[in-house]
Image (tube, helix red, strand yellow):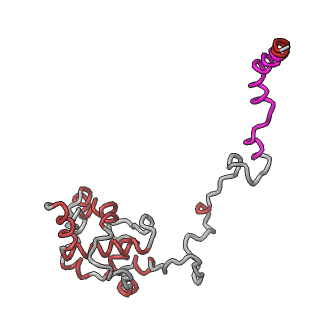
Amino acid sequence: MRRNRLGALLPLVALLGATGCDVYYNTIPSPDDALHLVPWFDAMIKQPTVYPYQRADVPRYTVAGSVPITGGEADWSAEWTVLNTTTADKLVNPIKDRGATPVGDSLFHTYCSVCHGQMGAGNGKVGVQLGAPSLLTDRAKAFSDGYLYSIIRYGRGVMPKYGDKVHLIEKRWEIVNYVRQLQSGGAAAATAAPGGTN
């Protein structure tokens, strides 16, 4: 009796073995094919490409008088590009009194030290080629925090803007604070302390 059942199942197993994969892959529709049935949810395969900023009628900046819903800050780039530093000099560093720990050191070394050097002396590998200024001069020390912040956000001279790379406002201020620590010698002392030498 057991042998008869096995003999009856053997042709079925052989049939499934011969055609099972073909049936599964060729006859049963794939779930991926179902995505194409809904035009607005087709996994972007047939979606038209849109380049909004290639058109002249699409504004590139926030419309004047609009209110940001996710925070943000005003745009003083037009003023900044004509060397008017009024708004920049009025900016108040909101994290100035956070203590002596150099919080912005990793950001400074990621974005700034290539030109301004590890300690801000203007001797970075790229900075020597471009003539990057030292951040340790009396002139640089006299800049307001807002002026340094504006340079980071919008750039100036050969320095490109970094506001599009350092997105968070607080992180830009951390870089300003680290530059101030470099100028006072505090960051150098903090860097040298753990390892013993610098």
Q: Does 33 lie within the magenta span? A: yes
Give the side of residue 52 with respect to residue 81, left or right.
right
- The quarter of the picture where residue 147 lies is bottom left
In this view, the residue farthest toward the front is 1
Residue 48 position (above or below residue 159) = above
**Which residues are drawn in magenta?**
9-35
Left or right: 52 in relation to 108: right
Instruction: Looking at the picture, tell me which residue is in the foreground, 32 or 15.
Output: 15
Please tell me which residue is depicted at 77% across the width and 30% down the height of the picture.
24
- Count of marks placed on residues: 0
Residue displayed at 18% across by 73% down: 185
Image location of residue 38, percent across then percent down? 79, 50
Name, please, the residue furthest toward the left.
Answer: 197
The answer to which image quadrant residue 150 occupies is bottom left
Q: Quadrant of the N terminus?
A: top right
Rendered view: 116 above or below 21: below
Residue 192 place in picture, x, y as percent: 17, 64
